[in-house]
Image (tube, helix red, strand yellow):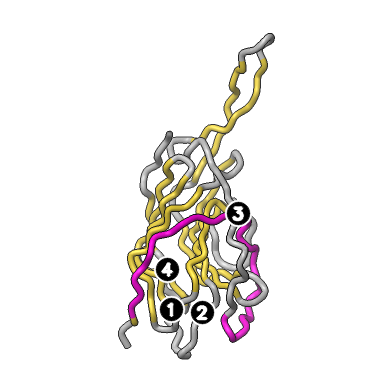
Amino acid sequence: MFTTQVLYAQAGESADLTLNGTASYRVEGDRVIVGIPAIASLRNANAISGTLSVELWALKQPYQGGDFDGAALAGTRIGELPDQHSLNDCRYDLLFQEPAAGTWHLSLMLREWDGNGYVTRDFVNFDHPYVVNWTPVVLQGGLETVAEAPQATEAAPAEAVATEMAAEQPAARPAKSSKRPQPRLPVMLSTSTAHRSRTLPG
């Protein structure tokens, strides 16, 4: 089983739902460990967010916001977050779906259900590309047969497993978002650790 190094990226602070601090991920075989120092709501409407999800995506170009196309590698729903509150010391142990062969840019996204789909509220891009190569493998039988099998570089694992997301309908924030809904995370979910919620200082 192959284990990658821990990679870090500094989260931005421009959104009203934010990934705060230096985020990280570490791939261990068919799982990925995602670390986020804090997930915060800077909104001040005495309300609650829609259902939030944390998602790790592989994209052909570094994410710059807006619509995107890519491969979902891991994700989990984390519930709703009241305004002026945060989740601290977040650590998610997720099933990991390795992308197809190629060079990918990984982006960790915080997304919110707005009643029509998940909309990206904040994100961080990891500096190092994630490269997956294909190498031939000789299978022994009556006759030698050559087949192709995926093999990742030193920054990637060799296996990945996906599982279905929970079936419950996510909750939407009462106020509708004016942003165009973005692609929903495909069938993928895993367990996550519990978090402490605190009120942000005024």
| Farthest-out residue, top | 142
Q: Residues within 10 Å of mark 1 (few under 14, many from 20)?
A: many
The amino acid type found where label 3 is placed reads: Glu
Q: Which residue is mark 2?
A: 49
Task: Work out whether 62 lies above or below 30.
Answer: below
Verify CB contact (< 8 Å) between mark 1 and mark 2.
Answer: yes
Q: Which mark is residue 19?
A: 4
| Residue 174 falls within the magenta-colored stretch | yes
Which of the 4 image quadrants contains residue 28?
top left
Q: Which residue is mark 3?
A: 164
30 sits left or right of 188 in the view: left
Verify CB contact (< 8 Å) between mark 3 and mark 4.
Answer: no
Q: Residues within 10 Å of mark 4 (few under 14, many from 20)?
A: many
Q: Position of residue 59 (x, y in %)?
A: 58, 53
The amino acid type found where label 1 is placed reads: Ser
The amino acid type found where label 4 is placed reads: Leu
Local SS, label 4: strand
Task: Work out whether 50 lies above or below 127.
Answer: below
Mark 2 or 3 closer to N-term? 2
Residues in magenta? Answer: 173-198
The amino acid type found where label 2 is placed reads: Ser
| Residue 83 falls within the magenta-colored stretch | no
Of tags 3 and 1, which is closer to the observer? 3
Q: Which part of the image, by quadrant, shows the N terminus?
A: top left
Look at the image and tell me whether residue 9 can be seen: no
Q: Which residue is mark 1?
A: 41
Distance of label 4 from label 2 (alpha carbons): 15 Å
Distance of label 2 from label 3 (alpha carbons): 24 Å
Q: Residues within 10 Å of mark 3 (few under 14, many from 20)?
A: few
Local SS, label 3: loop
